Image (spheres, coloured by chain):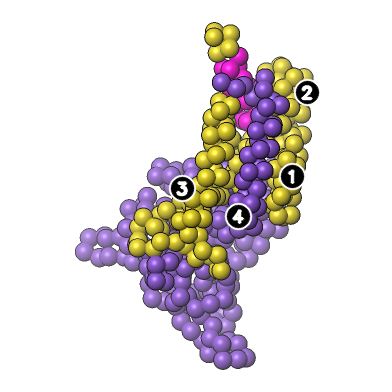
Chain colours: A purple, B yellow
Amino acid sequence: MANPFKDIKELTRDVETYLRNNRSAIYNNSKRISDFFEMACYNNIVRFYENNNFEVEIKNLQKTKFNYKCTTAGNPAKYSFFEVKKKVGSLEFVFEIRHNINVQSYHNTDIFTTPDICVIKPDSVLESDDFYDSKMKYYYIENKALISFCEVKNFNPYPELLFNFIGVVNELRPHLLRPVKNSGDSHIATTLMISGKSNKHADRIITNLQSRYHINILSDLFNIGGLTFGRHAINRLKSV
Amino acid sequence: MIQLFTENLPYKLSEQMTFEYNRRLSDVNFFISGQYNYYAHLKNDIETIQLLLALSIFYKRVLSNFDSATKFTSRVVFKSEAVSVQLGTYNLSPKEIFKLNKTVLTFKKLMEDYSIPLSLFEYLETKELLRKIKIYKDGLDRNNNNG
């Protein structure tokens, strides 16, 4: 068996050969790393619900394709999503986990922002004819239809990124910025999901913001995404 | 060492990988500089450590995302009648998934050939990686002495 400490030259040569042989697959797909990372996060949120005893079902396939909403534009009716449901006694609770849905501000009905992943009440997408100065329709949900949301950032965490997230929370879920005495346990609390690893200062900011507000800030998800959303690990996440 | 992996990657991704590599390499150099007896003897293996560090960054920043894409698509295909995932104009079809899987599996096979466990690449702090490398190297040395 080859030993990387003794056969470093052979290993380097074999790595070069591997990279050369797989160059086109690596290069072409690397352009979609951010989409893939969002997919991983989307998948992890669905896992959170599965591990929290929700039934998961895929809805709105377009012919035989899962149409993934990559942009903020477009009619949500043309895109696929996950539906999660849970029975509590005789009641059944149903929610949708959607991607890139425009959400009305908590403070003002005329302004909107688009989190990457939203957990929303079912059949809550509305359309507006007067948002644009054209015939184009604008699709959105009312703030009261929003249960929770996640922002996905394929960056290394830095102070402005972290503080900007608080601005979005303030716009959509301001009550999470006050001490929460009793919170539910069904839904993941509003979460910032970051691919990169935080440095010491960013770590301090993350700890501080999480202690002040009822939010999750998860960094280094390239590394520990699977671990964070495992069946037992999800108990460490804040929920609503 | 990281240039080996980044030369054909898009600029943004390449920059992030280089940033992480340089930051962690400076941590590695600090730990093996002689201030910590526990790691000091790894100084002779700096070339291998650099390659393992670069491999770990490539694995988690590139290949694990390919893996995520295949997992997501597998979930969708397994749980519904869908045959692929449409990402804008790009169709993540079974053929594309096969290619992505092949890229990941060939890498895993290469690591296996050199008895490099993928668990080596699961770390948060650079110190953790270095500790794993030390334990791994000691294990290889022991096996060689016994064999």
Drawn side of residue A44 relative to residue A52, left or right:
right
Mark 2 and mark 3: Cα distance apart in space: 37 Å
Task: Say which chain tag 4 marks.
Answer: A
User: Do discs 2 and 4 share a chain?
Assistant: no
Q: Nearer the viewer, mark 4 or mark 1?
A: 4
Mark 4 and mark 3: Cα distance apart in space: 25 Å
Residue in front for this viewpoint, A222 or A219: A222
Mark 4 and mark 1: Cα distance apart in space: 19 Å
- Give the percent coordinates (x, y) of residue A129: 53, 90
Q: Residue at x 60, y 87 (%)?
A: A132
Q: In the image, which disc is placed on residue A29?
A: 4
Label 2 belongs to which residue? Answer: B33
Q: Which callout, 2 or 1, points at the residue further toward the start of the chain?
A: 1
Label 3 belongs to which residue? Answer: A229
Q: Residue at x 53, y 77 (%)?
A: A74
Q: Nearer the viewer, mark 2 or mark 1?
A: 1
Task: Say which chain tag 2 marks.
Answer: B
